[in-house]
C-alpha cells in the first residue's frame, strides 16, 4: 500500500464517520421538531440520506480491501494467513464490540434515575428490560433489542462485520473456485431477496472493496460526482419506488465520487503528517464511532434550546452538532490516551496505522 493510499483511507474514514454523525443528528418530522419545515427536511435528506448513505458501505469496502489483500495471488488462497487474521479479529472486533455495547446501557440506566433530563434522552425505561432471563438480556444488549440491532443500535455495523469475518473463508473459497467478481455478482442479486440472519448487504460492500477499490483511482472524470449529485437531487424532488430498486448502483456511484473528489482536492504529494489537526482527528475515528450514541443525541438537543422551535435553530443544531461532538470526543480520546496509554494503545485495538473503523480489519 502506498503512503498516499494509506493517508487517503484515513481521511476518507474520518469524513465517513462525520457523515454517520450527520445521519444520527437529524431531527424527525413530528410535532416539536421539524414537521412542516421543508428546508430542514430537504437539508437533512440531502446530507444524511443521499450523501450519508455512502459512509457505511465505504467502511465495509475499505475493510474488505484491507482484509483480503495478500490472501489470494490469483491461483491459490492462503488459508493459513486467513485463519491468522480471523483469530486477530477476536481482539480487534469482538472485544471493542463487547465493551462499546455496554456503554449506552450503563449511560441510560444512570440517566434514568436523574430527574429533569428526560427531554434530552430518547431511550426511556431501559431498566424494565433487565427483569428477564440472562440469555434474553444478552440478546437485548448484543444482538437484537427488538428492532434488528443491538441496544447500541449504531454498532450493528460492527456486529455484522464480525459475522462477515467469520464467513470470510466461504467468500475466499468461492472466489478461488470461481472468481471474486462472480461472488460479488451473486451477492448483488441476493440483496434483492430477504435471507434472515445473513448480513448480505455488508457482505456485498465487503466484496465490492475486494473487487474494485484499488481500481477506482483509475477513474478521473468529474462527471461521475456530477451524475451522483443529479441523481440525489432527482431522488429528493421526484420520490418513487424506482429509487429503492437502484439504490445499490447509486451508492456505488457515490463511493466512486468520494474517491475521485479526494484525488481532485489532494495532490499526490499530500501527506497527512504535515497537517497536525487532521492527523489527530483521523486518529480517533474508531473511538468516535464506538461512543457517539447516546451522547450525540444530548448535544444536538442542547444546541436547539437557545433558538426555541425555529427552522434556523434546527438547521444550526443539525449542521454543528457532529463537529462539536467530534471535537469533544477527540479531546476525551487524547485525555484517555495520556491517562491510560495501555488501554488506548494501538496494541489493544491492533490497528496498523490509526484508530479508524476501517482498520478494525487490518492487514
Image (spheres, rainbow, N blue to C red):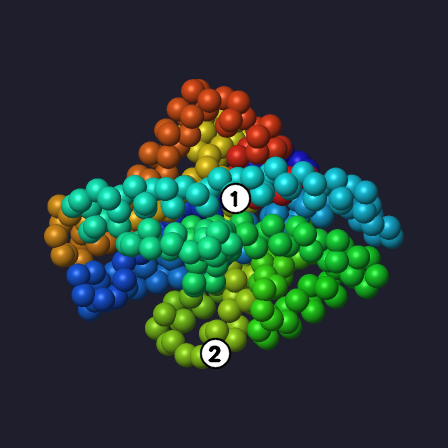
Dot 2 and dot 1 residues touching (CB under 8 Å): no
Q: Residue at x 26, y 50 (%)?
A: 121
Q: What percent of the width, then of the height, locates residue 143?
A: 51, 55
Which residue is under mark 1?
97
Compute the Cα span from label 2 to label 1: 36 Å
In this view of the protein, which residue sits in the foreground, 131 or 119? Answer: 131
Tell me what residue is drawn at x 45 percent, y 68 percent. 231
> Dot 1: few (<14), some (14–19), or many (≥20) neighbours within 10 Å?
many
The residue at which mark 2 appears reads as 242
Instruction: Find the residue positioned furthest to the bottom.
Output: 241
Within 10 Å of disc 2 (Cα), the crowding (few <14, some 14-19, many 20+) is: few
Residue 302, quarter of the rendered image: top left
Q: Residue at x 42, y 50 (%)?
A: 152
Judged by depth in the image, the label closer to the viewer, 2 or 1, is 1
Question: Helix, strand or loop at disc 1?
Answer: helix
Quarter of the figure with the C terminus: top right
Identity of the residue furthest to the right in this view = 75
Query: Does any portion of residue 268 appear in the rendered image?
Result: no
Q: Secondary structure at mark 2?
A: helix
Q: Position of residue 203 (x, y in %)?
A: 63, 59
Quadrant in the picture for residue 248:
bottom right
Q: Quadrant of residue 267?
A: top right
Q: Earlier in the sequence, mark 2 or mark 1?
A: 1
- Residue located 32% across and 59% down the image: 44
Amino acid at each position: 500500500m502506498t503512503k498516499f493510499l494509506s493517508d487517503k483511507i484515513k481521511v476518507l474514514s474520518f469524513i465517513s464517520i462525520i457523515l454517520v454523525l450527520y445521519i444520527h443528528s437529524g431531527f424527525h418530522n413530528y410535532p416539536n421538531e421539524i414537521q412542516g419545515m421543508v428546508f430542514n427536511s430537504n437539508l437533512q435528506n440531502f446530507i444524511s440520506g443521499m450523501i450519508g448513505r455512502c459512509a457505511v458501505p465505504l467502511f465495509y469496502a475499505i475493510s474488505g480491501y484491507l482484509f483480503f489483500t495478500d490472501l489470494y495471488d490469483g491461483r491459490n488462497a492462503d488459508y493459513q494467513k486467513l485463519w491468522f487474521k480471523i483469530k486477530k479479529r477476536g481482539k480487534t472486533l469482538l472485544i471493542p464490540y463487547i465493551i462499546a455495547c455496554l456503554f449506552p446501557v450503563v449511560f441510560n440506566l444512570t440517566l434514568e434515575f436523574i430527574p429533569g433530563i428526560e427531554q434530552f434522552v430518547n431511550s426511556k425505561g431501559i431498566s424494565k428490560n433487565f427483569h428477564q432471563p440472562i440469555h434474553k438480556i444478552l440478546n437485548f444488549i448484543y444482538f437484537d433489542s427488538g428492532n434488528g440491532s443491538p441496544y447500541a443500535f449504531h454498532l450493528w455495523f460492527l456486529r455484522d462485520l464480525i459475522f462477515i469475518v467469520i464467513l470470510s473463508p466461504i467468500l475466499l473459497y468461492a472466489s478461488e473456485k470461481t472468481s471474486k467478481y462472480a461472488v460479488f455478482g451473486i451477492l448483488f442479486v441476493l440483496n434483492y431477496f430477504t435471507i434472515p440472519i445473513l448480513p448480505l448487504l455488508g457482505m456485498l460492500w465487503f466484496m465490492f472493496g475486494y473487487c474494485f477499490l484499488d481500481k477506482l483511482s483509475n477513474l478521473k472524470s468529474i462527471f461521475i460526482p456530477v451524475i451522483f449529485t443529479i441523481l440525489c437531487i432527482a431522488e429528493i424532488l421526484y420520490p418513487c419506488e424506482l429509487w429503492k430498486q437502484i439504490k445499490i448502483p447509486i451508492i456505488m456511484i457515490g463511493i466512486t465520487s468520494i474517491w475521485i473528489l479526494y484525488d481532485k482536492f489532494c495532490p499526490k504529494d499530500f501527506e497527512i503528517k504535515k497537517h497536525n489537526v487532521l492527523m489527530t482527528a483521523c486518529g480517533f475515528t474508531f473511538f468516535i464511532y464506538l461512543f457517539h450514541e447516546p451522547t450525540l443525541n444530548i448535544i444536538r438537543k442542547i444546541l436547539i434550546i437557545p433558538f426555541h422551535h425555529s427552522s434556523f435553530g434546527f438547521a444550526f443544531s443539525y449542521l454543528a452538532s457532529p463537529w462539536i461532538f467530534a471535537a469533544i470526543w477527540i479531546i476525551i480520546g487524547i485525555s484517555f490516551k495520556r491517562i491510560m496509554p495501555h488501554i488506548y494503545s494501538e496494541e489493544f485495538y491492533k490497528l496498523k496505522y490509526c484508530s479508524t473503523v476501517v482498520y478494525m480489519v487490518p492487514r
